[in-house]
Amino acid sequence: MSEAILLSPVGKREQTKVQNRQAILDAAREVFGELGYDNTTVRDIIRRTGLAAGTFYNYYRSKEEVATALSDDGARRFAPILKSIRAQAKGWDDFVRSAILAYYEFLADEHESWLAKRPPEETQPHVYGETPEMAAVFREVRDAIVERITTGDRPPADPDYLAAACIGVAREVGEHMLAKRPIETKAAAAFATAMILTGLKGLSEGAA
Amino acid sequence: MSEAILLSPVGKREQTKVQNRQAILDAAREVFGELGYDNTTVRDIIRRTGLAAGTFYNYYRSKEEVATALSDDGARRFAPILKSIRAQAKGWDDFVRSAILAYYEFLADEHESWLAKRPPEETQPHVYGETPEMAAVFREVRDAIVERITTGDRPPADPDYLAAACIGVAREVGEHMLAKRPIETKAAAAFATAMILTGLKGLSEGAA
Amino acid sequence: MSEAILLSPVGKREQTKVQNRQAILDAAREVFGELGYDNTTVRDIIRRTGLAAGTFYNYYRSKEEVATALSDDGARRFAPILKSIRAQAKGWDDFVRSAILAYYEFLADEHESWLAKRPPEETQPHVYGETPEMAAVFREVRDAIVERITTGDRPPADPDYLAAACIGVAREVGEHMLAKRPIETKAAAAFATAMILTGLKGLSEGAA
Amino acid sequence: MSEAILLSPVGKREQTKVQNRQAILDAAREVFGELGYDNTTVRDIIRRTGLAAGTFYNYYRSKEEVATALSDDGARRFAPILKSIRAQAKGWDDFVRSAILAYYEFLADEHESWLAKRPPEETQPHVYGETPEMAAVFREVRDAIVERITTGDRPPADPDYLAAACIGVAREVGEHMLAKRPIETKAAAAFATAMILTGLKGLSEGAA
DNA sequence: AATGAATGAGACTTCATTCAT
DNA sequence: TATGAATGAAGTCTCATTCAT
């Protein structure tokens, strides 16, 4: 036990540094979610952390950089999940099903985690937007679907529209899923999957 | 000279008032389209009109109010179209088909009109976003679909997800439609409609 | 009398505008003189005017722009004086004598005028620097002298050093003149002139 | 290895202290030369040393204090030179000649030394200003001249102006000397000396 | 002593909004 | 009602300085 500690002898300094960096990231995630990315200012972020104004700039150079860090973080955590799905999926249907379920589960997790941290009072007219993190994960899923489609696994019609339609269903249903209590990822995923797969089938047949 | 004006039932004042109000609206539509709603400032709008800064506040209290006016305007212009579709549609399928086509045509129109007004030289990084008008019209369509669904015209599954799925397809495909040249509203509408209708059919059957 | 007024019917608006512009210029002249150009901030300038922070930017875009305006102002007022001296001067000696006297008189005037406006309390460690205005007028004189020298009116030695020497005497003596009470422009000018002219003569003879 | 250090009368601590103090001084000299005193920040100085920000304050309380130290250093190094000149000079003329030459040589040395240290690539707009050291040495020379003048060695006219004139020539010519390649201290000194001595002679005669 | 992150004052600037004309 | 300058809050960012380690 003590060995592990000895192997990574982090001083109090390093510790607070990591904590602060995380605090800024967390605050940004929250505020982006509440006010929307565009309406958020650097001040909003640091205000939430309780740190001094200048401290922000010890960690990030701008709001954009925080957003990028957030995106990277989300994508980095989701990427391995998606990768294993890509590898294991038996055919297109299975892939879509698994990918959307994984996406929704990640979404639910993320959402809960920053919902939990939000202060209870909600006096302001909030604009719940998509956080950079959610957007990044969404892009991962989208790219995977688009790749599958363009790879020829799925035949007919304009692949651009095809992907757009899948994306549209996945995103919109996902968003509504987050608004329900309790959040039911399985049901939502089942729904979206069915909609997409049948819809696509209809297209092929129509094209045939 | 002044006679003509004096004879007119609307005095010069009234006329100017209407003109200014419209000028602000037009300018706002353009700028929202070019910079995106969030990035647009009141200054951007009035600068475009050529009016004085203070004049803006004789007509609107804020950027938000202009956006609302713009939304209302869009909705007001689109409402009769949608109404006649609702009246004439023969069944659910026909309704979806017509509504989405009408929506896409409106979208294309709007989009073209502010694209046309843009100055040829593009020194700044433009962000072509959804204008408040587009958003409003979208909401109209969405509400119509939701209403149809909840009215029981369409049976199965969670109506919330159902609507979300339709909406997702319609919006996302619509957006991609605007990115293509030439803009083909019919093809896009046909695609989205097919996707939605087959998808829904699959859901009912799956539920049965 | 009233005609003149009718010919330039300045409203109260135009009036305050001119006043503000002038107030900023005056404040800048003072603060530059007291703190030195480099140590002066835009805030220092507007603080002195009593205007709001933003108002500064209605008139000038930066500290640099104020400095330029100040320089231009000084140079513009001094230029005609110098021009007539150039035209009328009988030979090199006369030119130097007249130019330096004119320069000193201008300096004394300027100095008095911004001294007069300075608040009496001088608690801070002041750094009396050259204002942009003084610098501009000085450059005018310098250019005139340099031109005369390079034109061949004056023969010997490195013209660069020659001019530098003249300049050095003129500037340094001028500065000391301003520190004395009463300010005696004639005596200072006589001194500097004698020093320069004899010094130069010595050089030619030495070269010969 | 450690023995040598242990044997040494100054411990490692002491040595580092001296080294750091010197490193800061050197860095400051460089940066003042490159950016100009006013534009230099404490951060600029410590960045150049490679030391930590806080370390600076173990040695100096502010940028001003470093400048003072630098001045003192310059003066301290120049003082003995000037002293011997004072002692050996045969009369006023000889004194002026020697003092100015010494001053110019010191100037050239300083200038070269920080020019040499500059990195070859010059991405930033450099401002080669007078360093605190140069200023200090200049003051030494000025004081010496003033003293000679007021001591009665040189009779006529306002001693204040007299000194100012000498100073003006010396400084201005010195500055131009540094701008030429190669730097010719002897020629510049000869010029300035001639100018001053003849000029002064003219004044006495004029006064006589 | 050395370190370097935290602090917070303060500089610069933009912008929504007001208000005298 | 139109005008457009004045206002001042607020955002961005830098920097001197402190202080826990």
Image: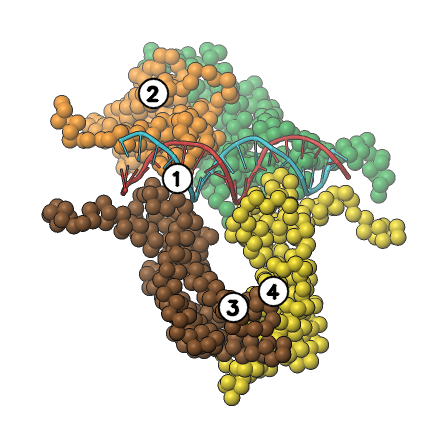
Chain colours: A yellow, B brown, C orange, D green, E cyan, F red
In the image, residue F12 above or below residue D69 = below
Q: Residue at x 45, y 29 (%)?
A: C44
Image mark 4: chain: A
Please report the residue visible at 48 percent of the width from the left and 30 percent of the height from the top: C39
Name the subunit of mark 1. C
Disc 2 versus disc 1: distance between alpha carbons? 25 Å
Q: Which mark is residue B151?
A: 3
Name the spot of residue C187 as percent of width and height, x first.
32, 15
Please name which of the two marks, 2 or 1, marks the residue nearer to the observer. Answer: 1
Residue under disc 2 on the same chain as residue under disc 4: no
Residue C194 shows in the view: no
SS of the residue at dot 2?
A: helix
| Amino acid of disc 1 | Arg
Q: CA distance from mark 4 to mark 1?
A: 49 Å
**Marks 3, 1: nearer the viewer:** 3
Q: Alpha-carbon distance for marks 4 and 3?
A: 23 Å
Name the residue carrying label 1. Answer: C61
Mark 4 element type: helix
Q: Nearer the viewer, residue D44 or C149?
A: D44
- Estimate the spatial distance between the alpha carbons at disc 3 and disc 2, rounded to whole Å: 84 Å
Give me the disc on residue A174. 4
* Marks 4 and 1 share the same chain: no
Spot occupied by residue B13 in the image (x, y as percentages of width and height): 23, 45
Q: Nearer the viewer, residue D182 or B64?
A: B64
Distance from label 3 to label 1 (Cα)? 62 Å
Q: Give the CA separation, mark 2 to mark 4.
A: 73 Å
Residue C51's quadrant in the figure? Answer: top left
Q: Nearer the viewer, residue C12 or C183?
A: C12
Say which amino acid is labelled 3.
Thr
- Could you tell me which secondary element the residue under label 1 belongs to? loop
